[in-house]
Image: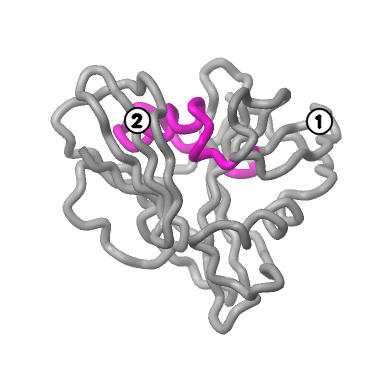
């Protein structure tokens, strides 16, 4: 299980995201940048214990209406080869030292575990407590067969979110549709979906799909 350290990050996660979010096609805040607050999320464990994985929710109040963004992040102790375009930034961790923070939709370790979560083979973990499951994060899988990721073949951002294409065995290619702007909607007819909660600006608990799985 991943250990959550009670320590400092310099710069902090919100500072990194405030600089990075306006470059995303799904960003809906003010042109001069977001005003961010934490609103929820969860983590996944890396079986090899090397990569930190957080599915963070932040609420942006810079525009006309508050917007809740879903931002998967991976934390690494060294740069990820070939992923310069996915780098959100670097930060100094009070215990672990320098950490490279990536858009997790481009990190094969995170995507592989995210697929396992969608198929019910992995368990979401509490965002801020070590060795503590997050039972409110639920997955529903109706696909034909359970499959492991062989390769992350593409990740494309659009205004609706991020589509990740993975090659699996058995089963062939699958698409993970990552919701970026969270809303209380229904996932529709898909092979699987992941539902979790977040808090609105006024503290109201919301719930909706964080991702869907399409064959």
Check the image and name the residue furthest to the bottom.
64
- Look at mark 2 in the image and give the residue it sits on: 166
Assess whether residue 115 is covered by the magenta stretch. yes
For the residue labelled by badge 1, is the local secondary structure a helix, a strand or a loop?
Answer: strand
* Earlier-in-chain disc, 2 versus 1: 1
Q: Residue at x 57, y 50 (%)?
A: 56
Q: Residue at x 81, y 30 (%)?
A: 98
Image-based side of 58 in relation to 78, left or right: left
27 is higher (above) or lower (below) than 81: below
Image-based side of 93 in relation to 111, left or right: right
- Look at mark 1 in the image and give the residue it sits on: 98
The reply to whether residue 45 is in sight is: yes
Quadrant in which the N terminus is drawn: top right
What stretch of residues is rendered in magenta?
A: 102-128
- Image location (x, y in percent) of residue 151: 39, 22
Q: Residue at x 80, y 27 (%)?
A: 96
- Image quadrant of residue 132? top right
- Image location (x, y in percent) of residue 101: 68, 38
Assess whether residue 136 is covered by the magenta stretch. no
For the residue labelled by badge 2, is the local secondary structure a helix, a strand or a loop?
Answer: strand
- Image location (x, y in percent) of residue 114: 42, 35
Q: Which mark is residue 212?
A: none
- Image quadrant of residue 33? bottom right
């Amino acid at each position: 299980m991943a250990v959550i350290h009670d320590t400092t990050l310099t710069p902090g996660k919100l500072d990194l995201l405030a600089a990075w979010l306006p470059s995303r096609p799904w960003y809906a805040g003010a042109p001069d940048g977001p005003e961010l607050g934490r609103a929820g999320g969860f983590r996944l464990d890396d079986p090899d214990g090397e990569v930190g994985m957080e599915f963070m929710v932040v609420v942006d109040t810079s525009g006309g209406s508050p917007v809740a963004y879903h931002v998967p992040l991976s934390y690494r102790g060294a740069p990820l080869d070939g992923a310069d375009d996915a780098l959100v930034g670097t930060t100094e961790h009070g215990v672990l030292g320098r950490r490279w923070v990536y858009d997790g939709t481009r990190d094969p370790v995170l995507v592989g575990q995210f697929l396992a979560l969608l198929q019910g083979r992995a368990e979401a973990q509490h965002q801020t407590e070590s060795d503590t499951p997050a039972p409110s994060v639920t997955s529903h899988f109706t696909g034909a067969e359970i499959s492991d990721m062989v390769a992350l073949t593409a990740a494309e951002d659009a205004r609706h979110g991020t589509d990740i294409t993975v090659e699996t065995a058995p089963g062939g290619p699958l698409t993970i549709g990552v919701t970026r702007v969270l809303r209380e909607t229904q996932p529709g007819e898909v092979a699987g979906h992941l539902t979790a909660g977040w808090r609105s600006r006024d503290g109201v608990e919301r719930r909706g799909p964080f991702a869907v799985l399409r064959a």
